[in-house]
């Protein structure tokens, strides 16, 4: 049991720490992609926003009072942008929106600055695009506010109406519309990134589940097979203990060797070193069937593809265990071909085909390697067959090489 516990601990640790096909830890794989994108925006865009704001204050401010108010709008824009890159815009959205809206009102009515829209053109689209509902209505309200405040300039000055219309209505409203319109697809882009990130997280979780199922299947192959063989051999040794002590002693030695081999295989499983050999499994199955009084017929028709050797060994081992556990077989026929293996026994019980979880798991693994595992019950015979498509010939091996 110590080795079983160690095997499970190692497999669980590997599942938790290693992401599928990446070699990276799960914490690295699940680092939010949105955060990285926003961090990139922070590095690339924030300096531009800051420089633009400083130039605005330097050019437009005629007094220290103008500079203070316009600077407040720039600061609010920077705060909102930094909070947006950190995914924490909701906390500062209202204060920044109020400040920048007030700065635009001050610029239109007092400071004679159409560029005071700078702060609101940054904060407004950021806030509107992050709204869960009524984003369209909020965008219309934002554009309407910008236009109405700009038009109010006509109430406090008698300057050229055409110039004021362009400077305080058309340009600020157009800038707000353009930036807001760009933020909507930007928000959709971040939503797609979030969906892809969630899909990757689910894929990683499924890989962990698949790895645990694979580990459980391999552990079942080792322990389940060994325990049933030990059960048969112990029963045989009990029958022979008085009639043939020498044979009984031999069976006990084989049980001891089998248990030792199982411990070794469990260690190898824990450290991902276990490999099955079809030839060894074939010999082992033959010995087990003969020990159980089952006649075995083995036929070969060519060499097995080395790529499928291990999986076919697993199929043979699982089928052998199922025959010993569930069937009342008198004869087993094992056929090997270059494309796979078939195992048939005449001990199939009457009635519907029984569900065999071990073979169901193996079927998924065989299919994952491009093969097919079929289970049939017909005329008292139970057939398990695993086949793989033939491998493509190596062109380099087929073409003769020219002498140097």
Image (cartoon, rainbow, N blue to C red):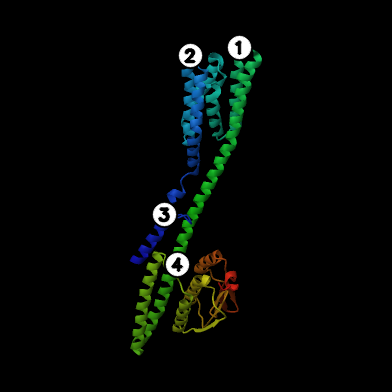
**Mark found first going from the N terminus, 3 or 2:** 3
Q: Residues within 10 Å of mark 1 (few under 14, many from 20)?
A: few
- In the image, residue 51 lies at what x, y percent? 49, 27
Dots 3, 4 in contact, CB < 8 A? no
| Label 2 neighbour load within 10 Å: few <14, some 14-19, many 20+ | few
Give the image location of residue 58, x and y in percent.
49, 20
The residue wearing badge 3 is 17
Give the alpha-carbon distance from disc 1 to disc 2, as whole Å.
22 Å
Of pointers 1 and 4, the one earlier in the residue sequence: 1
Q: Depth-wise, is mark 3 or mark 2 nearer the camera? A: 2
Judge from the rendering whether residue 77 lies leftward or rightward of residue 161; answer left or right.
left
The residues bearing labels 3 and 2 have C-alpha atoms spaced at a distance of 61 Å
Q: Which mark is residue 284?
A: none
Residue denoted by label 1: 155
Q: What whole-number distance in Å separates the C-alpha atoms at marks 1 and 3?
A: 67 Å
Crowd class of label 3 (few under 14; some 14 to 19; many from 20; radius 10 Å): some
Q: Which residue is mark 2?
A: 63
Q: Are marks 1 and 4 in contact (CB under 8 Å)?
A: no
- Residue 253 falls in image quadrant: bottom left
- Which of discs 3 and 4 lies nearer the camera? The answer is 3
Which quadrant is the N terminus positioned in?
A: bottom left
The numbered mark, 4 or 2, whose residue comes first in the sequence reads 2
Using the image, determine if residue 325 lies above or below residue 48. Answer: below
Residue occupied by mark 4: 218
Mark yes or no: residue 13 visible. Answer: yes
For this orientation, the residue located farthest to the top is 158
Q: Position of residue 110 (x, y in %)?
A: 53, 14
């Amino acid at each position: 049991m110590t080795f079983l516990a160690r095997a499970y601990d190692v497999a669980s640790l590997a599942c938790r720490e290693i992401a599928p096909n990446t070699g990276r830890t799960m914490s690295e794989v699940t680092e939010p992609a949105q955060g990285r994108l926003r961090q990139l925006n922070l590095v690339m865009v924030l300096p531009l926003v800051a420089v633009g704001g400083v130039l605005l204050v330097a050019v437009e401010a005629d007094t220290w009072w103008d500079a203070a108010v316009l600077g407040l709008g720039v600061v609010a824009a920077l705060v909102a942008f930094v909070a947006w890159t950190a995914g924490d815009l909701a906390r500062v959205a209202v204060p920044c929106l109020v400040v920048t809206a007030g700065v635009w009102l001050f610029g239109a009515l007092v400071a004679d600055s159409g560029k005071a829209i700078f702060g609101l053109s940054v904060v407004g689209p950021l806030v509107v695009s992050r709204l869960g509902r009524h984003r369209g209505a909020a965008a219309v309200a934002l554009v309407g506010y910008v236009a109405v405040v700009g038009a109010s300039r006509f109430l406090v000055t008698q300057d050229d109406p055409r110039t004021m219309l362009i400077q305080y209505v058309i340009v600020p409203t157009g800038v707000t519309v353009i930036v807001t319109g760009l933020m909507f697809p930007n928000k959709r882009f971040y939503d797609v990134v979030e969906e892809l990130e969630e899909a990757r997280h689910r894929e990683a979780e499924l890989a962990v589940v698949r790895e645990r199922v694979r580990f459980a299947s391999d552990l079942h192959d080792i322990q389940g097979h060994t325990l049933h063989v030990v059960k048969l051999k112990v029963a045989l040794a009990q029958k022979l203990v008085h009639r043939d002590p020498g044979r009984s002693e031999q069976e006990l030695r084989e049980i001891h060797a089998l248990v030792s081999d199982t411990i070794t295989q469990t260690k190898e499983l824990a450290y991902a070193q276990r490999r099955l050999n079809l030839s060894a499994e074939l010999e082992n199955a033959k010995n087990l069937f003969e020990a159980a009084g089952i006649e075995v017929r083995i036929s070969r028709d060519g060499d097995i593809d080395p790529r499928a050797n291990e999986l076919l060994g697993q199929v043979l081992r699982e089928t052998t265990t199922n025959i010993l556990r569930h069937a009342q077989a008198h004869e087993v026929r094992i056929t090997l071909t270059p494309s796979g293996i078939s195992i048939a026994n005449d001990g199939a019980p009457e009635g519907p085909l029984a569900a065999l979880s071990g073979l169901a798991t193996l079927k998924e693994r065989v299919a994952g390697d491009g093969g097919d595992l079929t289970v049939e019950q017909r005329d008292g015979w139970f057939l398990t067959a695993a086949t793989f498509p033939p491998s493509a010939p190596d062109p380099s091996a087929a073409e003769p090489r020219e002498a140097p």
